[in-house]
Image (tube, rainbow, N blue to C red):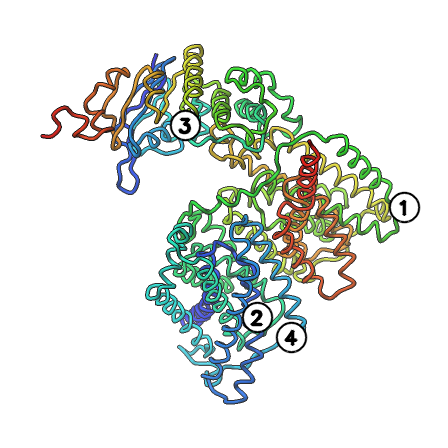
Amino acid sequence: MDASFLVAQLLTGLASASSLFITASGLTLVFGVTRIVNFAHGSLFMLGAYLAVTIVPRLLDLHYSLPMFALGALAAALIVGLIGVAIELILLRRIYRAPEIFQLLATFGVVLVVQDLVIRIWGPLDILGPRAPGVPRSVEILGQRISGYDLVLIAVGPTILGLLWLLMRRTRFGVLVRAATQDREMVGALGVDQAKLFTATLFVGSFLAGLGGALQIPFKPAQPAMDIAIISETFVVTVVGGMGSIPGAFLAAIAIGLLQAFGALIIPESTLVMAFLLMAVVLVVRPWGFLGKPDAHLGARTAIEGVKSLTPLDATGKAVVAIALVAGATLPLWSDAYGLKVAIETLCFALAAFALNLLIGVGGMVSFGHAAWFGVGAYAAGLLTVKLGLHMAPALIAAPLIAGAVAAFIGYFIVRLSGIYLAMLTLAAAQLIYALCFQWVAVTGGDNGVVGVWPAEWAAARAVYYGLTFLLCVAAIWLLRRAIHAPFGYALRGARDSHLRAEAVGIDVKGQRLAAFALAGAATGLAGGLYAFSKGSIDPTLLSIPMSIDFLAMVLIGGVQTLFGPVIGAGLLHAAKDFIMPLTDLWRTWLGLTIVALVLAFPQGVLGGLAQWRARFARSRKP
Amino acid sequence: MTVLAVEGLSKSFDGVRAAQNVGFTVNAGELVALIGPNGAGKSTTFNMVGGQLKPDSGRILLDGNDIAGLSPRLILRRGVGRTFQIAQSFLSMTVIENVQLAIAARERETMRMGAPLRGLHADEAQTLLDKVGVADQAETLVAHLAYADIKRVEFALALAARPRMLLMDEPTAGMAPAERKSLMTLVATTAKTNGAAVLFTEHDVASVFAHADRVLVMARGEIIARGAPDEVRADPLVREVYLGRSAGTPGGQR
């Protein structure tokens, strides 16, 4: 490995850093002003790429030149900017004061809608963009061939940084943005029209996302999955750089670009893992990122109204539970094989969602990567069976233990944070594990996963396996519920209610939260293990972001304020998915719109809304 | 008998000296008030003793052992109970659950995942609620209580640790005068019977002079006067700090 090769690698790293920075600067700008982590930023990036591959070739037909290429890219970015404005006007404006979990979920709803939209308009196939006219395919530097377009990108990143600097320092808009980033309430109190400021910010932020997407078409095709890929990376950049800091994002993008370029030399499969490892390390050493500042307002809003006072089940509740248990236990007698399959999956999801609400509703920790523990459980069970030839029973014992251990290890870093940072780190941790499973092909089978994860012979019959799942999931939920009613759950809830008071009465808040993470991880791991054996296979979608969102949607649909809400939510979501998915190509649109509608209309979820409605009804009947 | 002895305690924020060379003692059964205008360093001093802030220098001796720089949890374990200026109770729980949880935490039972909290330490919790006068609201959610009652729950939470030393930050803020008096009388009685030392801050000067055995006056990060309430009241320096030079010092027009 000689010096010139390292220089080439350095330039490649800087080019990808530059490209990443353009997109990330938009996200961090929007976050700084609105305090919303816009999941849909990746969708805007994707739209930028698709619009560019549509517009740029037509302009190049008119006149084949670099200015036309640039014009096309700018036009695409401009349209994306306007789409961002539309999103702000229709959705974001209504959720500025909502807890972060709702903001992330609502903007993820937009992600789902845009995914369907893109496939509907441009189809599912990759679309390659044209090369930039006049830019040499490669340039020789120190005897190494460097892509000419990489050099262009290396120049564009700092240019954008400079332009943003001018915008921030030399314009009234910039002054307001900087003021709002420091103290949003104060800017509002001083009589600045916040609505206009936020709309303008969304325009600039979305424009940058669109530009980021448009500028990468010469070397990366536009494709439907690019939104999730870029959003994880931009999340990492914004968090590492310090949320809201544009220069921080620049430094972070360079750090990540270089880390990936040189990391790939040592372990080629490590590129995805590197970024998330960096984020984990930075968040622990400098919880506010490179150039971020501690924000007193942050986290204050995290206090979603979680589980309230616990009471033992009343007569109605006991009757409902009894009926549900009898119906569940006798299901094989009156359901067909398909119904049993759906029931098995629903039970696994119900356990996972119940465990997630232990963290969110009871612990006040909005975990955005819950699929990680589900996936680790599934992979543990699957790999132990297929690769090591273990039987089902020991594999099912190992799944929760391994998932719990991994959750405890990662939880050690996570419980140091709170609010949006905690949510981002859980997301990053889940993506880290996803990346491991995706890239470590030799062990995990990569994208294809592993097949042949079948139950032991005695449990091979669908009805028997259902019985086993029913027994284990109900038992696990019962144990978790017991823990929530025990001093453990109260102490966890106490830490959520008041960190100060919890410490002052002698509760070890971090320890309590860590135990909750391990417990929730183990329970979810069991659910994942059971799920793997029911499917007969494992693959990375089990621990992907959409899976985490499904769990969050279950909790949200059921309501975070009730213990059994998420169980109902799991049933509703899975049944709906099973019923609607075959009927429409637009499943994601429906799910996305449902999530958005739920956030806007029923922030307490179905059970929570029902309870509130019952209370209101009872009050109105009283004389 | 001296329970708390603070020596040479200092703390700066970004070069601003919030507390410098603060020293005082609090004896068993004694109520000591820490007063001073806003920004005098009362809360800083308080939070250092409670462990919420780490002092730059100085010693905080509890029964002779230095607790400076320990975490709030460890300081509680050494026998320091505290209440907060803005009430910090467990709002999603009932009054008795609040106290039961505090007792369970004292007994290091917070990792227990089996038997429900409901039946745990219920008698002891009820006794504490009787003592602070909110027994009839035991099953009410704290979030639904009147503010004065929340302050009483705060007191019960501090007592749950069976503290040798009570730190009370504005224990009666936001209460009506009659309620203030009854709560402070309760604090005084409790301190005398349990032999606990009490350090409290207070804005309401009437409360201070009625209930404190001794008063410490802080201004600009330093203790500028100390003594029995009457001595402190007569101290010209104190008048100057509170009322300004011209009004406070006889012949202040120098």
Do the residues bearing badges 3 and 4 touch, measured as CB atoms within 8 Å?
no
Query: Image height check: is A318 above or below A233?
Result: above
Of tags 3 and 4, the one toward the viewer is 3
Q: CA distance from mark 3 to mark 4?
A: 64 Å
Q: Quadrant of residue B142?
A: top right
Same chain, labels 1 and 4 = yes
Looking at the image, can residue A262 be seen?
Answer: no
Relative placement, left or right, of A476 versus A151 is right
Q: Quadrant of the N terminus of chain A?
A: bottom left
Mark 1 neighbour class, 10 Å CA radius: few under 14, some 14 to 19, many 20 or more: few
Residue visible at 62% across and 58% down in the picture: A109
Of tags 2 and 3, the one toward the viewer is 3
Q: Secondary structure at mark 1?
A: helix
Q: Amino acid at mark 4?
A: Trp
Query: Image height check: is A192 above or below B15?
Result: below
Q: Amino acid at mark 1?
A: Trp
Do the residues bearing badges 4 and 2 touch, measured as CB atoms within 8 Å?
no
Q: CA distance from mark 4 to mark 2?
A: 10 Å
Q: CA distance from mark 1 to mark 3?
A: 64 Å
Residue for badge 2: A47
Q: Earlier in the sequence, mark 1 or mark 4?
A: 4
Q: Secondary structure at mark 3?
A: loop
Q: Quadrant of residue A117?
A: bottom right
Mark 2 neighbour class, 10 Å CA radius: few under 14, some 14 to 19, many 20 or more: many
Residue A334, disc = 1
Q: Earlier in the sequence, mark 2 or mark 1?
A: 2
Residue for badge 3: B173
Q: Amino acid at mark 3?
A: Ala
Residue A144 horizontal/vertical position (percent): 44, 77
Q: Earlier in the sequence, mark 4 or mark 2?
A: 2
Residue B231 versus residue B114: which sits nearer the camera?
B231
